[in-house]
Amino acid sequence: MQIVIIGSGNVAYHLAKAFVLNNIPLAQVFGRNEKDLNKISEELKVPYSTEKLEDADLYIICVSDGSVENVSKLITKKDCLVVHTSGSLPKEILAGEYRKSSFYPLQTFSKSKELNYEKIPFFIETENEEDKKILFEIASKISKNVMESTHEKRKYIHLTAVFACNFVNHLFSRAKEISDSQEIPFDYFLPLIDETVQKIHEIEPKSAQTGPAVRNDARILQLHEQLLKDESLEIYKTMNHSIKKMYEL
């Protein structure tokens, strides 16, 4: 099977790497950012192009959600399978006469961070059983956790991921701003962060909640509010309100 990955960002890089590490041959990595494509090509020994899209049986579109539809129009071949890797878009966003599917890896991807690909959940939606078999076979060479999912279910999977990953990471960024403002090394907080994440492998998140809001410690909450301003103060108030409401304090 001839496979082409379209894109040069974080998802494209990691999927290409996962394919190569698991001996799934790639015919090409295609995109518009020649600098990034060249880096991927040199590291993974995969041909790339910014001009001519290679003929393939499977095209995997790894671009931003807003670009998926337009990029999918570049594929004019009809007898092929085209997938996107978005967590929120329906497979019908793909604008061609080919077979359409979604191939969603549930993970946060950064080129500079190594990943254990076999732990990444893959969620697959196809138009027919044959395509499902093809994508399951490919994903199962990479991951031990491959599932079928409808678009409706995938939307909620992606929403949950935003809360569990993107929002949490933003709070890390805000926390670092506070520690930096007082010249406190952020490294001091890494054991706390690690324990917080590790704990929910064993305890339900709701049961693992600690802190002044869940204790309804008004004195500490007021003190913290006096130390904050602007966006961080609003975030602090919003988060504490949510915690209190969850525990009916």
Image (cartoon, rainbow, N blue to C red):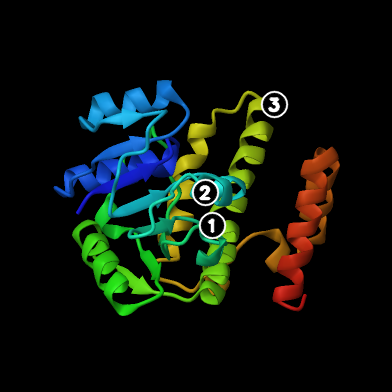
The residue labelled by disc 3 is 181
Of badges 3 and 1, the one in the foreground is 1
Residue at figure coordinates x 41%, y 61% from the top left: 98
| Residue 93 appearing in the image | yes
Q: Secondary structure at mark 1?
A: loop
Residue 229 visible in the current orientation: no
* Disc 3, SS: helix
Q: Earlier in the sequence, mark 1 or mark 2?
A: 2
Residue at position x 35%, y 29% from top?
A: 49
User: Counting other residues with Cα less than 10 Å from the Cα at mark 1, is it few (<14), some (14-19), or many (20 or more)?
Assistant: some
| Residue at figure coordinates x 76%, y 73% from the top left | 245
- Are the two marked residues, 3 and 1, in contact with CB atoms closer than 8 angstroms? no
**246 left or right of 106?**
right
Q: Residue furthest left?
A: 23
Tag 1 and tag 2, C-beta contact below 8 Å: yes
- Where does the image place residue 187, in percent across and percent down from the top left? 48, 33
Q: Which residue is mark 2?
A: 73
